[in-house]
Amino acid sequence: MEDIFNNPWVQSPQIPSVQELIKTVTPVNYIRGSGQARQRLDLLEASYRNWVADIVDLVDFKHCYFVNGVTDALNQWIATETRPWQYLKGDYEYARLIGGKGESVEEIQSDKLLYISNPACATGNVISLDKIDNPVIMDCAYVGSIAKTQLSIPKNTEQIWFSFSKGWGLVGQRSGLVFSKKPHRSLKLMKKVEAWNYTSVEICLAIITNYDIDTVYNEYKHKQFNICTERDLEPSDCFFIANSTKEIYSKRRRTGNIARLDLSKLF
């Protein structure tokens, strides 16, 4: 296996224009309780709802919270979740690492709470969830690295999570949003005391102001296609991920005989 595919974790490519944009954002330190931080977060929420509307309709998800990426969202959820839950084999590694009442399954069990990523962490591909009746926690971390295509949201979805890590190359920035139908048990308290990263909110607002949700996808999709053509790989819906059934990539297999390959180092 090539050295570039040795890392099991997805890094996402650094986007030069995004890195330059971040340098223009002035760090802020609002006085807690002044209302300034809340005003900026409310602006981010409203802006994000419009920004992502062609991919995810968030009209039923009335509550919004800022988190340190979807890993933090998963932590906050598990800390307050009492129900047994399931996740598909090959989904986000942290679901397995966090343990608790989570169970890895080959096929979705109809009687249990489901954590699932869409686009799928296992392949980077958009998946159909139209027939899912389970209560669902949906991880949409890869939105921002795919084309504008409407994702199916199961009717019993309780929370939807988003990240600025994948599509924008901000893995170390730790910025994400949780949208939920009901108030979140722990995040509602953190929101009340204005406990989130104020400067990260400004960075997210700068990205939304300067880019469309599919800007980076449109800019880099052709490069993904060329890389996959040269190496005989299957491009995924996510612009920096490819898939392969070749034995040489067997260590990167996440579901069946499909290996997920991060192309970030080739960008």
Image (cartoon, rainbow, N blue to C red):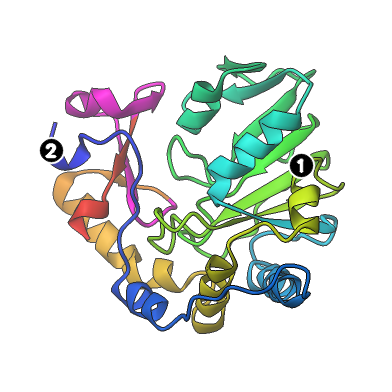
State the image quarter where residue 103 is shown. Answer: top right
In the image: residue 144, left or right of residue 179: left
Q: Residue at x 83, y 62 (%)?
A: 59
Please say if 2 is above or below 143: above
Q: Amino acid at mark 2?
A: Asp
Disc 1 is placed on an element classified as: loop
Range of residues picked out in magenta: 237-258
Seen at 34% across and 38% down, the residue is 9
Q: Quadrant of the C terminus?
A: bottom left
Q: Are marks 1 and 2 in contact (CB under 8 Å)?
A: no
Residue 53 is drawn in which quadrant? Answer: bottom right
Task: State the image coordinates of residue 121 (x, y, percent, origin top left).
Answer: 48, 39
Residue at the spot of label 1: 186
Magenta stretch holds residue 264: no
Question: Is residue 118 in view?
Answer: no
Tell me what residue is drawn at x 55 percent, y 17 percent: 106
Q: Secondary structure at mark 2?
A: helix
Decide which of 76, 147 is in the foreground and name it.
76
Residue 241 lies in the magenta-colored region: yes
The local crowd at label 1, few if under 14, some if 14 to 19, many if 20 or more residues have their Cα within 10 Å, is few
- As drawn, the label of residue 3 is 2
Please provide percent x and percent y for residue 73: 63, 43
Q: Amino acid at mark 1?
A: Ser
Q: Residues within 10 Å of mark 2 (few under 14, many from 20)?
A: few
Q: Is residue 185 left or right of residue 92?
A: right
Q: Quadrant of the N terminus?
A: top left
Q: Is residue 266 above or below residue 251?
A: below
Is 4 placed left or right of 52 in the picture? left
